[in-house]
Amino acid sequence: MTKVCRSSSLWLVLSAFAVLSLWAAEPSGEKLPPPRKGEDAFMKVLAQRASSRAFLPTKALPRELLSDLLWAANGINRPESGKRTAPTAMNWQEIDLYVAMEEGLFLYDPQGHLLVKVKGGDWRAKTGGQPFVAKAPVNLVLVADEKRMGNLPPEKKAFFGAIDSGFVSQNVYLFCASRGLATVVRAGLDREKLREEMGLRAEQRVIVAQSVGFPEE
Ligand SMILES: Cc1cc2nc3c(=O)[nH]c(=O)nc-3n(C[C@H](O)[C@H](O)[C@H](O)COP(=O)(O)O)c2cc1C
């Protein structure tokens, strides 16, 4: 009987400790006011930023929309300094945007705001194996040109190239959210194979691709 009593009080004490430690683990801090997500256009865009893999097939992006997209992604927003909508470490500006479409592979030239044809043919499916990739009207390929990054060790070049392309990708996400377009960034691709197919130099590293298009209804 005493044995039963002892073990049940031990159980009670242990349970009390468990409850107390759970209570102690509760996050503490000042409760912030709720974010004003509908306050202005920028907050609304952030509230809508999302990945989507459902693209309306065969609907190309009009040139005006493509122009806005590329400028938003990595265009020149301060002509006096030539600086861009996306930051880069040391202002290397090493991220190039290739545009794979049904009509070919293009390079975005931000200086002239030009679409420069690199190769003909439908390039979309070459930019990744996921089934929606071939359907998306635009697949951006973000390439870091390590030649512009000076004398850094390779791992640092890879590090900064990955970070800098993240800003470009987020610009694309926010642009797409603001215009009701679907987009998803993709690292799941054979980057080396794509680099070779695109005819890039060894110092030009494919970092990610990003599909963009009208959302499937
Ligand atoms: C670096 C990176 C690589 C990604 N690679 C892929 C990919 O190869 N294929 C894919 O469908 N989604 C990919 N995504 C999208 C993520 O799955 C997505 O961002 C995540 O599920 C969160 O969803 P959200 O973007 O809607 O918030 C990638 C995202 C990031 C940031």
Image (cartoon, grey):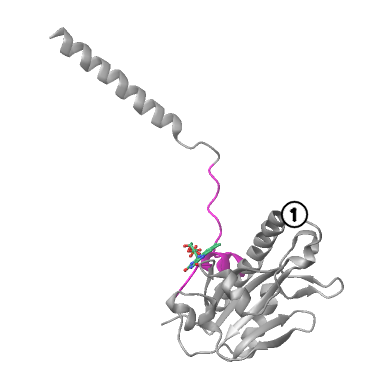
Residue 18 point in image, percent of width and height: 35, 26
Write the start and end of the magenta stretch as one range: 31-53
Residue 65 picture location, percent across and down: 62, 85
Q: Determine which quarter of the picture holds residue 205.
A: bottom right
Position of 161 relative to 81 (above/below): above
Callout 1 secondary element: loop
Give the residue displayed 53% in from the left and 53% down from the top.
34
Q: Quadrant of the C terminus?
A: bottom left
Image position of 2 (left or right of 106):
left
Please tell me which residue lies in front, 88 or 21.
Answer: 88
Q: Residue furthest top?
A: 2
Whole-percent x, y for residue 203 in the image? 72, 68
Residue 206 in view (yes/no) = yes
Where the N terminus falls, by quadrant? top left
Residue at image position (80%, 59%) is: 90
Task: Determine which residue is flagged by label 1.
Answer: 153
Q: Is residue 198 above or below residue 24?
A: below
Residue 111 located within the stretch drawn in magenta: no
**Residue 54 visible in the shown view:** no
In the image, residue 177 sits, relative to residue 37, either above or below, namely: below
Q: Residue at x 69, y 62 (%)?
A: 161
Q: Quadrant of residue 141?
A: bottom right
Indicate the amino acid at tag 1: Pro
Q: Where on the picture, by quarter, is residue 61?
A: bottom right
The picture places residue 26, in percent across and down from the top left corner, at 45, 35
Q: Residue furthest left?
A: 1
**Residue furthest out toward the right:** 80
Is 36 colored magenta in this rendering? Answer: yes
**Dominant secondary-structure state across the stretch colored magenta:** loop
Q: Callout 1: 10 Å neighbours few (<14), some, many (20+)? A: few
Q: Nearer the viewer, residue 200 or 185?
A: 200
